[in-house]
Image (cartoon, rainbow, N blue to C red):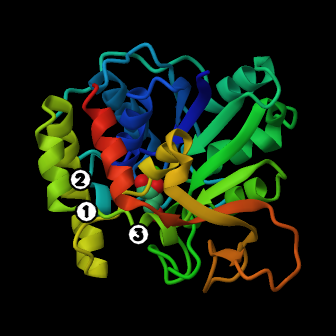
Amino acid sequence: MTRRIVIDTDPGQDDAVALLLALASPELEVAAVTAVAGNVPLSRTSVNARVVCELAGRPDVPVYAGCDRPLRREPYTAEYVHGPTGLDGADLPEPVMPLADGHAVDALARLLTAAEPASVTLCTLGPLTNVATLLRDHPGAGRGLAGIVAMGGGFFEGGNTTPAAEFNIYVDPEAADIVFRSGLPLTLFPLDATHQVLILDDHLRRLRALGRVGRAVAGWLEFYERWDVAKYGFEGGPLHDPCVIAYLLAPGLFGGKDCNVQIEVESPLTVGMTVVDWWGVTGDPANCHVVRDVDAEGFFDLLIERLGRL
Ligand code: RIB
Ligand code: CA
């Protein structure tokens, strides 16, 4: 029984690896990829998503361009991490496959409205602008969603963009607030989880040995990890977004608990903070399953085995 998913993404090297993992895994049907402005502008994320689909030999997967700026705030991008193209580190051709027609939000609304109830899992790897716009403008679309699995936020680990805020939430906190208040089944991979998934030299060696795809992935990751290694002193960069896909494939690699999570949208000091009530002190109802425990080596074994199939 395959699981039907949509991946909303701002590639970004770690997004790209997540896309490859999904496309390499027969348990998943990638019904669509929706690009959003994030790590780099939409003009690049909508190209990069297609570069990755073609690298995976899947030009059949529809890639839609979505929102090119946050709901309210000025765009904030991360070329300082991902490079000007967003996929620096590997020299791959520009895509031949065209963008799918229409706005990503409209495509998502059509897909979810036509889907069986609770049949599609939405995997979000970037700012939540597309998803919030969908929920705001197409209130019935949520019926088709089995749930949302999102990379974003941080609690005991703090933020990576400000001391309080992680990038995906910081870029569009109003969008995140809409999603976290939606009542949809939500699973969150915060920095507390993804900072345990560090790219080590042995992982890069094993990736290069896979051939063309593995060499491209190793090149991306060697470029992308510099910023986190310099900032945190980690022995490798954290591989954030592929955790979302790995969770669908092997949930036993992860552990967490249901918590109340709210988004700070007002304070200039802490805007974009995910306020995770891990110890249940507020008594507020849980609205999110927050992942905190990761079997990192089990994750890399899965990732490398699957990428070897491409
Ligand atoms: O903070 C890490 C997240 O922000 C990842 O999704 C990365 O790709 C960037 O979008
Ligand atoms: Ca991302």
Q: Is residue 99 positioned above or below 234 on the image?
A: above
- Between tags 3 and 1, which lies in front? 3
Q: Which residue is the site of mark 3?
A: 195
- Residue 266 percent location from the top left of the image: 73, 77
Q: Which mark is residue 96?
A: none
The residue sitting at 41% across, 16% down in the picture is 98
- Between tags 2 and 3, which lies in front? 3
Q: Which residue is the site of mark 2?
A: 221
In terms of secondary structure, where does tag 2 sit?
Answer: helix
Q: Mark 2 or mark 3: name the one nearer the start of the chain.
A: 3
In terms of secondary structure, where does tag 1 sit?
Answer: loop
C-alpha gap between disc 2 and disc 3: 15 Å
Counting labels gives 3
Q: Nearer the viewer, residue 32 or 66?
A: 32
Q: Is residue 59 positioned above or below 233 on the image?
A: above
Q: Mark 3 or mark 1: name the one nearer the start of the chain.
A: 3
Q: Which of the 4 image quadrants contains residue 90?
A: top left
Q: Amino acid at mark 3?
A: His
Q: Which of the 4 image quadrants contains residue 230?
A: bottom left
Q: Is residue 263 positioned above or below 26 on the image?
A: below
